[in-house]
Amino acid sequence: MSHVDTEVRPSNFIRNIIDEDLESGKHTRVHTRFPPEPNGYLHIGHAKSICLNFGLAQDYKGLCNLRFDDTNPEKEDIDYVNSIQADVHWLGFQWDGEIRYSSNYFDQLHQYAVELINKGLAYVCFLNGEQTREYRGTLKEPGKNSPYRDTFVEENLELFEKMRKGEFKEGECALRAKIDMASPFMCMRDPVIYRIRFAHHHQTGDKWCIYPMYDFTHCISDALEDITHSLCTLEFQDNRRLYDWVLDNLDDFQAPNRTRQYEFSRLNLEYTLMSKRKLNDLVVRGLVSGWDDPRMPTIAGLRRRGYTPAAIREFCRRIGVTKQENMVEVSMLDACIREELNEHAPRAMAVINPVKVIIENYPEGQVEKLSAPAHPTIESMGERELVFGRELYIDADDFREEANKKYKRLIQGKEVRLRNAYVIKAERCDKDEAGNVTTIYCTYDDQTLGKNPADGRKVKGVIHWVEATSAVPAEFRLYDRLFNQPNPAAAETVDEVLNPKSLVVKHGLVEPGLVNAEAEKAYQFEREGYFCADSKDSSPEHLVFNLTVALRDSSN
Ligand code: ATP
Ligand code: MG
């Protein structure tokens, strides 16, 4: 399943840490985890984390868990749980054993909270939200101790039990770790570790009305799963203190080689929003058709757009893993898919802005079968059948009544080669009242079929075409970036940075063989771009093709 070539894998600081840990004997194995919160679909940023965590496990012959970090039942949904599994598989990775859920550990987490209370390290606090904020202090000023901080252990145990039984209202109180209200790290100022939520949970149903907080849950889940290297993004750097504090204070986790947290910089991509909350907004407001809209940076969107797992993995390899915050150019992602499709995608012809061509010296009512390679260099991909006849369609942009030498397409009075077929000459054309060309009348030379016609005629231009009676109507969805600003996250509202032309729909024609095009599998439509049949909306009766990526980078 792995396509990872360790030879070409660049080293990074996390690999250096692992190498040292293995060399010193601190660890004899590598065990990572990918811990998504099931509150949205995975995006290309998650792919970076997936490739890192699963990739390390593969390369070091270790293991990687998939763990749903599901401590926030109100925002979570089983649909997300399912899509995340499908996306990880699709990217080419397999987790070790069963899927894990933080909620699997709710009983144990509860016990560990009781252990902290018993040690005088946690207390039930009745300050309301506003008071809690006020007592917390600021980055410049230390906080103040909560008046509930010195409640006796026995009373705290009782109060926590009452919380568990649902005897307090939501927000009335919370369990806080007793650490240091003057700590320079805000996360250490007596953070909440359990709160009350009367919410149904997708895994545990109505068993609990208290839910553990992320910082308390994550380190314990890692430790319970014997994770060796817990990799997360830089915004959790400060929280590492809390990660260690929780484990330091629980008897079960005193092994010197227990899990450690390491942080790397998250992926930021130009012209792209990456926060699940903001992506969810786009979906809810109907600004895109769903999480899998082909313009979305989600794995599901990229898949529907025609991206391949290999191209996404290659992108993640190229961006590397560091601690530097940076913004990656979209052209890097485009280049990965373009390189792969140029090499592997079958070729086909599609006419997006059709205009009719009549070959006047071709017998009426006759059609002939021609053959063309499915790929210019990969012979094993075989041949495809084309139909040629008296009436054809070419792209309106490929004809001019007059043009200079730079225009290497069809010009009135001149010749051009039809891709995989004959040389034709434009004789005259019809136009409508607005001056648009409606029909081009041509003649063809029947001695010019094949790659090396014997006539030795010098015809520079080659254009694509389809035959009128056999071509199949198709809808083309031409996608562009969703935002017209490199950093849409900086905008006040998404509305002001939405690209109004992120989707342009055209109706044209494709060669007959494409009726059975497999969804999400991209073709190179010659001279047009890479396209794939849409997995939701395309059918043989109504073909819909998504633009995966243009043939060339036009951004610079
Ligand atoms: P978002 O901010 O998009 O909502 P998140 O961090 O809340 O993302 P999680 O489901 O908690 O999403 O993320 C699962 C894992 O993926 C975490 O370890 C997180 O650090 C990592 N991750 C999320 N976004 C990125 C990103 N842009 N680049 C790299 N890793 C990421
Ligand atoms: Mg998160």
Image: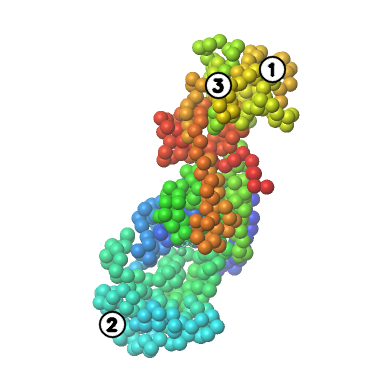
User: Are discs 1 and 2 less than 8 Å apart at CB?
Assistant: no
Answer with left or right where residue 404 lies relative to residue 269.
right
Q: CA distance from mark 3 to mark 1?
A: 21 Å
Which residue sits at x=64%, y=44%? Answer: 553
- 441 w.r.t. 248: above or below: above
Q: Residue 370: x percent and y percent?
A: 56, 19
Q: Which residue is mark 2?
A: 158
Q: Which residue is mark 1?
A: 453
Q: Which residue is mark 3?
A: 392
User: Are discs 3 and 1 less than 8 Å apart at CB?
Assistant: no
Q: Nearer the viewer, residue 483 or 179?
A: 483
Residue type highlighted by circle 1: Pro
Residue neighbourhood size for the residue with mark 3, other residues' Cα within 10 Å, grouped as few (<14), some (14–19), many (≥20): many
| Quarter of the image where one finds residue 280 | bottom left
Residue neighbourhood size for the residue with mark 2, other residues' Cα within 10 Å, grouped as few (<14), some (14–19), many (≥20): few
| Residue depth check, mark 3 versus mark 1: number of the one nearer the observer | 3
- Which mark sits nearer the N-terminus, 2 or 3? 2
Q: CA distance from mark 2 to mark 3?
A: 84 Å
Residue type highlighted by circle 3: Leu
Q: Residue 256: x percent and y percent?
A: 51, 73
| Residue depth check, mark 2 versus mark 3: number of the one nearer the observer | 3
SS class of the residue under badge 2?
helix
Q: Residue 543: x percent and y percent?
A: 45, 33
SS class of the residue under badge 3?
strand
Residue type highlighted by circle 2: Glu
Q: CA distance from mark 1 to mark 2?
A: 93 Å
- Which mark sits nearer the N-terminus, 1 or 2? 2
Q: Is residue 553 visible?
A: yes
- 396 w.r.t. 489: above or below: above
Which residue sits at x=62%, y=49%? Answer: 331
Q: Nearer the viewer, residue 448 or 185?
A: 448
User: Are discs 2 and 3 less than 8 Å apart at CB?
Assistant: no
